Image (cartoon, helix red, strand yellow):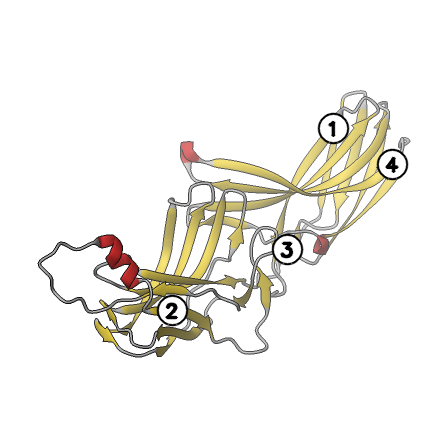
Amino acid sequence: FGSSLSQCGGISLIPSPAPFDHNMLQGLFGGACTVDINLDAEATRKTIQMGRDQMGEKSYIYTDGEDVAGSAIVSIRPGKKLDHQGIKVELIGQVENVTDRVEKYDFFTISKDLEPPGPLLESKQFKWKFGSVDKSCETYAGINCRVRFFVRLTVVRNYASNVVKELDFVVQNLGIPPELNNPIKMEVGIEDCLHIEFEYNQSKYHLKDVVVGKVYFLLVRIRIKHMELDIIRREITGQGQSQVTENETLTKFEIMDGIPVKTESIPVRLYLSGFDCGPTYNNVQNKLSVKYFLNLVLVDEEDRRYFKQQEIFLWRKKIG
């Protein structure tokens, strides 16, 4: 999928007693070749758009244990020669702090040498393959943290910066259906003012599931004007004193408009497929946890808010 080209190059310099002009040297190195890298994916492989808003480039989806293969191309321009110290391709899994791009942690790196050091006189294509790659955690794009999987092509050079081209892909893994999936039942209230019961049909949901439940009003002495059910994603990054927690409301779903009466029962039906939910993640590489909550909110006529959160567990039933 449309990957831009990176420039690199090199020429043989005739020795001269004059000192090197590094600006001129950098300019000369810039025009000898271009590099590109691609994934060899079958036509049936699913794709997804990258980024938090899923508005980025489309990328192929891989799962744990699958091979990742492709090609790398170094194109030499006519009349040019590339002197290099080796060409390699790497497969990398990385946790990145979004607010501080310098703070990156590579939790695995697999490397393959494509070409030993020496001159390259003509364009060359290299095939590469990483077999049965362990990809136990998923791609994630959050507020403060993201988990990336990508292939990196590097042309190592002596007299200038290495030429690097990266190509991202997405990792998704099927979850294990829960053996036990107990319903959620809770009572909440304010003494002598409000007493409600709410129940949800289960506590674990797949990403295309439906939350079904009921809210019972046992005592109502507060003039409630509406009630809503929110889905909240809680992202926890770092550890100890450096730990950061971010809460993000994915949706606010109104389930009642008007004043309830005692003994009234309000049905709840919320389809998860319409929202940007992902699986629950627990302590990914000791860097990241992601949890999801159902937040029942009641608002009275003076705009005071009463709420109760309940954690739910989300898992992936289908790739894509």
| Helix, strand or loop for disc 4 | strand
Which residue lies under the disc numbered 3? 180
Pair 4/3: label in front: 4
| Helix, strand or loop for disc 2 | strand
Q: Label 4 is placed on what type of residue?
A: Asp
Label 1: how many Cα within 10 Å (few below 14, some 14–19, many 20+)? some
Give the mark nearest the N terminus, 1 or 3: 3
Tags 4 and 2 touching, CB below 8 Å: no
- Return the residue nearer the eye: 104 or 259: 104
Q: Label 3 is placed on what type of residue?
A: Leu
Pair 2/1: label in front: 2
Give the mark nearest the N terminus, 4 or 3: 3
Which residue lies under the disc numbered 2? 35
Which residue lies under the disc numbered 1? 306
- The residue shown at (81%, 21%) is 302
Tags 1 and 3 touching, CB below 8 Å: no
- The residue shown at (38%, 74%) is 73
Q: CA distance from mark 1 to mark 3?
A: 31 Å
Count of picture labels: 4
Q: What is the quadrant of the C terminus in the image? A: bottom right
- Return the residue nearer the eye: 124 or 23: 23
Q: Label 1 is placed on what type of residue?
A: Tyr
> Measured along the vertical axis of the image, is residue 131 above or below residue 179?
below
Give the mark nearest the N terminus, 4 or 1: 4
Which residue lies under the disc numbered 4? 257
Give the mark nearest the N terminus, 2 or 3: 2
Q: CA distance from mark 4 to mark 3?
A: 34 Å
Tags 4 and 1 touching, CB below 8 Å: no
Kindly tell me whether residue 84 is visible in this rendering. Answer: yes
- Find residue 12 and report its image quarter: bottom left
Q: Is residue 279 left or right of residue 305?
A: left
Q: CA distance from mark 2 to mark 3?
A: 52 Å
